């Protein structure tokens, strides 16, 4: 096989005349079968790793949490292998594997600060509730944080879950998909896999004796909002080119939880109108500021897909 044919024959790379989509940038292209297939396998490995342990305990039991910590960290060691072995040669001629996975020093401070501010704007309504009910005072107590870092459930929700999920579903999947699809298409594929990955909770809820109707309702709702968040998270990664951006947003969202609209509706008429106004203001402000506060140049994002976002 000739030298030119050898490069074209590399797994997932087709000769220009046979490519189903035009090359994205300087010959960077993977076939959809390779990129989407690899992402599906990564997602399956992630979910399967949570169930390799035989246990009668629920997901919140300390032994279950510790074992799953170990499992997802193993997955975090395996997932980058897909990026390293399947990416086009043209990618690594310009960037390192860690750069396309979002681990760069340039723009890092901005990638931590602005997405956090942006996500806080989205939660303007719930944050206002925290201020009025005095819960914010708890966060100023050193003992709260000392207790939190010793709590396995807190560590899972605020650190390990955001870290492992963003690393796997964003940092490892998107660099592959962006070698196949336009950014806006790639940003829709990983959220679907992310949402589907959360359906494994159906098994746990059924084991707990929850009625099937309730299980399906809750699971569908969880699939919906995790998919919506996945789109936002993927958008942050693609626009900023930093892993830190979706990670801090994910950790903050996990801390806030889903907004308690029932609490808002239970307020007096005057307070209810104010809180509803703040919820709407936060959502509108987030939508308006999202494109500006994720301007790629602010994050020194010069990765191969940056010119197309």
Image (cartoon, rainbow, N blue to C red):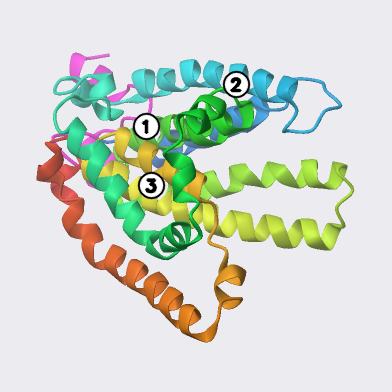
Q: Residue furthest bottom?
A: 269
Q: Is residue 20 left or right of residue 71?
A: left
As displayed, is residue 191 above or below residue 36? below
Circle 3: element type: helix
Residue to which mark 2 is pinned? 69
Q: Is residue 10 magenta?
A: yes
Residue found 50% across the figure and 35% down from its top: 158
| Residue 12: % across, % down | 37, 30
Label 3 vs label 2: CA separation? 22 Å
**Depth check, front residue: 189 or 218:** 218
Query: Of tags 1 and 2, which is closer to the observer?
Result: 2
Crowding near the residue tagged with mark 3, few <14, some 14–19, many ≥20 C-alpha atoms within 10 Å: many
Crowding near the residue tagged with mark 1, few <14, some 14–19, many ≥20 C-alpha atoms within 10 Å: many
**Depth check, front residue: 182 or 5:** 182
Query: Of tags 1 and 3, which is closer to the observer?
Result: 3
* Mark seen at residue 302: none
Residue to which mark 1 is pinned? 171
As displayed, is residue 63 above or below residue 12? above
Residue to which mark 3 is pinned? 233
As displayed, is residue 309 above or below residue 14? below
Label 1 vs label 2: CA separation? 19 Å
Query: Of tags 3 and 2, which is closer to the observer?
Result: 2
Residue found 85% across the figure and 52% down from its top: 210
Where the N terminus falls, by quadrant? top left
Q: Are marks 1 and 3 in contact (CB under 8 Å)?
A: no
Residue found 41% across the figure and 39% down from its top: 140
Crowding near the residue tagged with mark 2, few <14, some 14–19, many ≥20 C-alpha atoms within 10 Å: some
Which residue range is magenta in the image? 1-28
């Amino acid at each position: 096989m000739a030298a030119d044919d050898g490069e074209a024959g590399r797994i997932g790379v087709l000769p220009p005349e046979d490519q189903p989509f035009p090359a994205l940038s300087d010959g960077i292209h993977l076939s959809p079968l390779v990129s989407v297939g690899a992402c599906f396998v990564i997602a399956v490995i992630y979910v399967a790793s949570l169930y390799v342990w035989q246990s009668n305990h629920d997901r919140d039991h300390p032994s279950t949490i510790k074992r799953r910590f170990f499992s997802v960290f193993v997955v975090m060691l395996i997932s980058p292998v897909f990026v390293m072995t399947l990416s086009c040669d043209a990618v690594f001629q310009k960037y390192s594997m860690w750069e396309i996975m979002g681990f760069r020093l340039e723009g890092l401070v901005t990638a931590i600060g602005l997405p956090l501010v942006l996500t806080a704007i989205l939660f303007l309504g719930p944050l206002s509730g925290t201020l009025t009910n005095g819960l914010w005072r708890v966060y100023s107590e050193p003992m709260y944080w000392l207790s939190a870092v010793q709590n396995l459930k807190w560590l899972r929700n605020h650190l390990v879950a955001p870290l492992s999920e963003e690393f796997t579903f964003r940092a490892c999947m998107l660099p592959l998909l962006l070698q196949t699809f336009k950014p806006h298409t790639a940003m829709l594929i990983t959220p679907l896999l992310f949402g589907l990955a959360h359906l494994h909770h159906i098994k746990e809820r059924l084991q707990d004796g929850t009625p099937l109707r309730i299980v399906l309702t809750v699971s569908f709702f969880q699939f919906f909002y995790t998919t919506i968040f996945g789109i936002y998270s993927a958008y942050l990664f693609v626009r900023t080119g930093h892993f830190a951006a979706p990670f801090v947003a994910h950790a903050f969202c996990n801390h806030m939880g889903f907004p308690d609209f029932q609490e808002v509706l239970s307020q007096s008429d005057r307070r209810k109108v104010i809180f509803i106004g703040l919820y709407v203001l936060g959502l509108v402000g987030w939508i308006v500021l999202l494109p500006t506060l994720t301007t790629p140049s602010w994050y020194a994002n010069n990765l191969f897909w940056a010119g197309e976002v």
